[in-house]
Amino acid sequence: MQIDRHRELADKIETLKKQRNAIILAHNYQLAEIQDIADFLGDSLELSQKAAQTDAAVIVFCGVHFMAETASILCPDKIVLLPDMNADCPMANMINAEQLREVKKSHPGALVVTYVNSTAEVKAESDYCCTSGNALKVVDKLKDTGDIIFVPDKYLGCFVSMKTGKNMILWPGYCPTHIKILPEDIMQLRENKPDAVVMVHPECHSEVARLSDVVLSTGGMLKYPAQSDAEEFIVGTETGLVYRLQKLYPHKKFFPATERALCPNMKMITLEKVLASLQSTSPVVKVHDRLREKAITPVQRMLEIV
Ligand code: 13P
Ligand code: SF4
């Protein structure tokens, strides 16, 4: 019954998508039925790259607000739709531009590296943006410069600082979903599945990262099993990734580190909302020119360092 409903909606979306010259970009944490209709699925870096390259007139962003904003910064002439405006990343709202200006005042001369999970106004106050997929490379490139202020994710910042040996000034932001993955979850699963490889996202608590085998972005986790002989994997990130991993590697087994790691914002996008969004060409996410002019340089630098 639900499968029929999904198919009916997917058919309507497909027809309308062609009429509107639209492309559907979806993050790896989206609901299974959204993943199934996406023209392109990826992590934050891959989605930004795709948005920058597409010839489509309309981008339907199945993700959260900062992702649609980044697409708007990169493609000012395109219509960027976010099917539910309430789909927002709580971590992105843990720092605002005024707070970042205060940190900059306290550390004159320091460069600001901002995680892409941030608002456009915070990006506009930054020197570089990065994603979890290239944060190490971005900071490595700046290793011999002065201090680095890193916002907003303290756990990603801590991981990058440890790996690059660069002392960084961290903002105390965090992802409410990833901190639900506890060290106890990893220890318990290691006991139950001693042969499984533990992959975790750098937004996880530092102790969880320390207990893992590899720390990777969602895009990295999707590639890793191809180069590993292991048959079983513990997936330390939002549970939506397990669907995609299992589809990509049907002969391997994937277990979420915990079912608690569910991002309610990522699950707000439904087929009904995608269809309604294409029908009404709304809600539109548009970064205004004055802000865009300041935010584009750090975002483009992010795309250049891969
Ligand atoms: P990725 O860029 O690794 O997909 O991460 C995005 C995100 O929001 C993680 O919570
Ligand atoms: Fe934001 Fe965390 Fe959800 Fe990613 S998983 S969108 S960082 S709240």
Image (cartoon, helix red, strand yellow):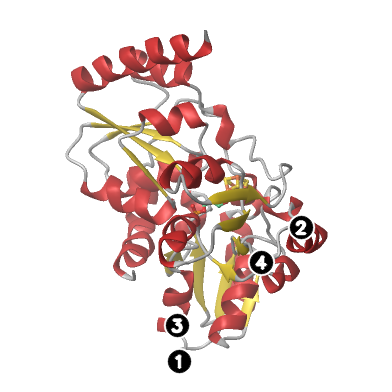
> Where the C terminus falls, by quadrant?
bottom left
Q: Rate crowding at label 3 as few (under 14), some (14 to 19) or many (20 or more) other CA atoms within 10 Å.
A: some
Residue at the spot 57% in from the left edge and 82% down from the top edge: 163
Q: Nearer the viewer, residue 186 or 302?
A: 186
Q: Between tags 1 and 3, which lies in front?
A: 3
Q: Is residue 259 left or right of residue 273?
A: right
Q: Give the mark nearest the N terminus, 4 or 3.
A: 3
Q: Which residue is mark 2?
A: 192
The reply to whether residue 87 is in sight is no
Q: Amino acid at mark 1?
A: Asp
CA–CA distance in space, label 2 to label 3: 37 Å
| Front position among marks 2 and 3 | 2
* For residue 142, side relative to residue 231 (left or right): left
Is residue 76 shown to the viewer in this render?
yes
Mark 2 or mark 3: whose residue is earlier in sequence = 3
Secondary structure under the numbered disc 2 in the rendered image: helix
Q: Select label 1 or label 2 by which is in front.
A: 2
Which marked residue is nearer to the observer: mark 4 or mark 1? 4
> What's the residue type where badge 4 is placed?
Tyr
Look at 78% across and 56% down and name the residue there.
185
| First in residue order: circle 4 vs circle 1 | 1
> Badges 1 and 2: C-beta atoms under 8 Å apart?
no
- Place of residue 158 in the rendered image (x, y in percent of width and height, measured from the top left): 65, 74
Tag 2: residue type?
Asn
Asked whether the beta carbons under mark 4 and mark 2 sit within 8 Å of each other, the answer is no
Q: Residue at x 59, y 80 (%)?
A: 161
Front position among marks 4 and 2? 2
